[in-house]
Amino acid sequence: MSTMLKEQEYANKFDWKLWRQILRYAKPFRKQLFLLGIVMVAVAGVDAAFPYLTKVAIDEFVVPRNTEGLLPFILLYVGLVLLQGFNVWSLITLAGKVEMGLTYRIRRAGFRRLQELSLDYYDTKAVGWLLTRMTSDTMRLGEVISWGLVDIVWGFTMMTAVMVVMFSLNWQLALVTFSVLPVLFAVSIFFQTRILAAFRHVRRINSRITGAFNEGISGAKTTKLLNRERKNLEEFSETTENMRHSSVRAAILSSLYMPIALTLGMGGTALAVWRGGSGVIGGTISYGVLVAFIAYTIQFFEPVRELARIFAELQSAHASAERVMSMIDTEPTVKDREDVVAQYGDSFFPKKDTWPAIGGQITFDHVWFAYNPEEPVLEDFNLQVRAGETIALVGETGSGKSTIINLACRFYEPTQGRILIDGVDYKERPQAWLHSNLGYVLQSPHLFSGNIRDNIRYGKLDADDESIQAAAKLVNAHDFISKMPKGYDSPVGEGGNLLSTGQKQLVSFARAVLADPRIFVLDEATSSIDTETEQLIQNAIQNVLEGRTSFIVAHRLSTIRKADRILVIRQGRVREEGSHDELMALKGYYYRLYTNQFIEEETARRVASL
Amino acid sequence: MKHINAIWTYMKGNRMLYLGAIISVGLAALFTLMGPLVIRLTIDSIIGSEPMDVPVWLENIILRLGSPEQLRSQLWIPGIALMVLAVLRGLFLFLRGKLAAQAAEAMAKRLRERLYDHLQHLSYAYHTQIETGDLIQRCTSDLENLRRFLAMQFVEVGNAIFMISFVLAIMLRLHVPMTMIAMAVVPIIFFFAFFFFLKIRDAFRASDEAEASMSTMLQENLTGVRVVRAFANEPYEVEKFEKVNSHYRDVTYRLIKLNAVYWSLSDLLCLFQIGLVLIIGVIWTANGVITLGTLVVFTTYEGMLLWPVRHLGRILTDMGKTFVAVERMEEILAEPREVMEERGDKPAMDGPIAFRGVHFSYDDAPTVPVLEDISFDVEPGETVAVLGHTGSGKSSLVHLLARLYEYNAGSITIGDRELKTIDRSWVRQNVGLVMQEPFLFARSIGENIALAKANATKEEVEAAAKAAAVHNVILEFDKGYETIVGERGVSLSGGQRQRVAIARTLLSNHPILVFDDSLSAVDTETDAAIRHALSHRAKDRTTFIITHRIASILDADRILVLEHGRIVQQGTHDELVNQPGLYRRTWEIQSAVKEDTPA
């Protein structure tokens, strides 16, 4: 189980298979990539032609002091300039198209996969981690494949063109000047790899600094009370000092590279002046060739630097590719069987008319479950829930009550044993079948940014405004919504932060009710809500549970008391089971819990309502 | 101007480094430009036969090396000269990068620490109203924006200015009409860059916004994954993402297309400028107006000049962003810091506490009194319970005691010292306040408990945890006290967090202890256990308890009943149950409930 959770490991060296996978996403852009290659060859060709034109100008016009035939030369020059302008335009447009299209497609595939992956995947990955895969990693892939291709083709063509021209002008001189090239290359690769690594290190520290600011700001009140200001600043200073040190190091590394590379390039120029100049004096080389060589040696540097940079970037893009692909390649652990999909469809293409109606009878049949193999949470767990029954689960954090709910919702599947719905193993049906009959209210309700109406509609996407209002009325949310300035169109803010906790809860109730589920799951909140809303929620729960099979992780005693059956869960086992009265008579754990809480709750409520 | 002043202040302490960087920029530019002059001299006067067009002193030096005829056979000499120039240029390029980075990074470090420190010292009231995300953005992205400006763009501007002035000076000396030709299109290129980037700022913003809304959607989907699954809304989510994803693609592609137009037009202009120099230069050289060497210098310079010019236009348009960033950081720094009264008294804080006619209202609503005419006395070692409705002013009362807010009128004395004259952090070292929703730092539980006391021993930490009834809970975790809590670690339940916070406060042995409804998420049994442990730990400690829980109030020495910011009743339990009022009604309900309870 946990080995399946692990990401597929890729070899650390360059991996063609991985890149072939990535290039799959570039398939629709084959035409653009092909054109891009051609354009880049043209760009490099024109770039390399300009110094040659200078050579022609000097040898044809300057040295013989003759301006005849200058007009065609000018026209040729202008023509090349216009061609280059067009080339640049098409290269950016094409590369941009490929970049954005590729990023878009990888993101689309990634998002689709994220919607399929089971919750165990989300347990092991922080949201921030997944976000980075979907944003910066995919962006880097898009960049490296489009602009990386641009740089590689341009760099190689340019170098080849320059070499061809120089060798054909004068191969002896070319050999002499090119002697600096291998050194330049080695130096560039050496530095670019290190520069990139240094900046990666800086980025890592930078995210630590962001984290420190986050903590410093969120924890400022606590810091005040603990008198930690100075100590916090001292600790923060360590991180900033680390940042300063690493940033300066990275900057020094890159400021070291430029001068060294430029000086090496100048070595080529100096060689050209020395050997070429002697050639001019000896009459074996023309002035034009000398000037062209000087210009070319200056032009060397650019493609070498670009190529070295792109190779270094490829390394880091490789890491991005590994991470993104391992995400996309992860198989969901909870998956509809092929024959099930064939018969009933899946989440994306449901065949709803073939779905049997749900009665609501749920059976746990010798169910075993573990999040990791060493620590089983449920061992041989059995439970029969009749259709329409309300089951309250009581127990401490970590007792296994959430696991029971997760299994019932098929967010996880049993490692052994079966869970039957209406007498049929739920693996015989698609997940969407169960989920579209599920009403689910979380302890900390999650709303999406948008307005209240859209948030309620989330329970049933094709619901009309009347049914939305009806659902809101049923859970007593209509009144507070109507009192808001924009009523149902009032925005809820990011994550619902414009509403109070109680209001968010009512909206999430309405959302669940709208879905008209056969099975209802309620993870009750403990947080203190004002009395009025508390009362509304209590009544809402009663309205909602009517006639549905329901699981309640209960904290409020009034809810527990009304449940048909109460299960006290400890260490993955049902320790006490029965109605409220039966359990009170037992005088066990439940009895203690109940008497303690009852006094407290009642008092608090009545005091507050005085 | 205001922004430039602010930036000037940030540079304090590193101004010499900046000066060094700027001088290096200038020298690097100078040595860069000398290379082509050496080539010109070589082509014209050594290989060719033109007279040397250099200052007399330089000509003398050159002639000392040998006559032009001798030099012709020793062309390695100009080669070496070129290398020396390249090395010098490299040296100053390196210095420029190094000094600018050192200066900018030192600035960034100081500014980060200043912001962090400032935020920590802003008032409690400020921190109840902030938006964390926005502040973090200011302290990170905005700061990064400024850092990049100072480390790179600032230097680039210097480079462009030096380049343009030096090139202009040399060109003018070489040939004035040719200089006019060489500069003909340059201003157009500059202004084209400037106005273009000004114009497409909207497109940039649109792309940024599209990216932000895509991230928001992603984030909401990922955090709400259970809700998505539970309602089987995966197809809907995929559709929603499709919209933001393709919107981002389209908007950004539009920006790229605009950029394509810019770069192609700008390249065209540059190539025309170079072509102009080349062709006019060729004609003039052919006619003997200028020498071949001069032509080579002009064409080489043109190439060196155009890039900084193009870049300058871009940087100047980007500068607006930097100024906005500076403004946003300055807003934080302009917030007044809490006056710590560091030279205030540091008296022993174990004396009697007296409130006399205390009035308090929040700064942003001065007409709404939160506390009115509060007077009461507390003897050392007493336990004071505060009871009242939500919003009756209970929390404000104890916040005043920890000097989180200032009272507007009346007086609070601790052992005859007026609270306002006592060093603020001294007050907080002596008043241990536990909040209802305490914050735990992203480190181990043990470290979280030991936070308040620098050199707490393991035994002390465990003793405090035991008193707060959380020791056993901690031991149940795989790593015990080493368990990391917070975002990247184990998430504790509300009650567990409260208990860790209590342990953290207990560790310091404050003479005054305040529980601001900080046992609300702990069950009654544990609550009682904690209070029991407390009474054993320190008998002479003055304790304030705010709670809804009547059981916790019963054995208090003094009970204050608050209503609408006023004390309506005070006394012991026995006194208060015999008076009509909120307390008795509460008590009656509680008794009734007790009898109600099926036992």
Image (tube, coloured by chain):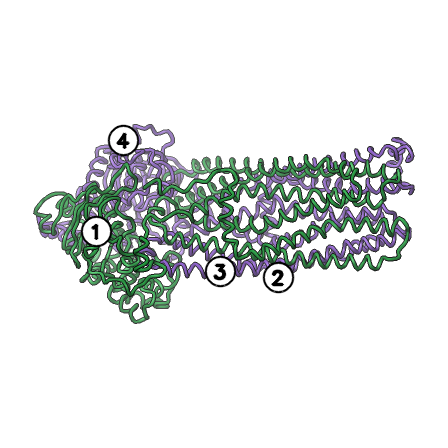
Classed neighbour count for the residue bearing mark 4: other residues with Cα under 10 Å, few (<14), some (14–19), many (≥20): some
Q: Nearer the viewer, mark 4 or mark 1?
A: 1
* Disc 3: which residue: B246
Q: Can the viewer see residue B384 in this picture?
A: no
Q: Which residue is mark 4?
A: B463
Amino acid of disc 3: Ser
Chain drawn in purple:
B
Q: Residues within 10 Å of mark 2 (few under 14, many from 20)?
A: few
In the rendered structure, which amino acid carries the disc numbered 2?
A: Lys
Q: Marks 2 and 1: in contact by CB < 8 Å? A: no
Residue closest to the far bottom: A466
Instruction: Give the mark nearest the N terminus, 4 or 3.
Output: 3
Q: Colour of chain A?
A: green
Image-based side of A384 in relation to A335, left or right: left
What amino acid is labelled 1 in the image? Answer: Ala
At x 52%, y 43%, the residue is A16
Give the amino acid type for the residue marked by disc 4 in the picture. Ala
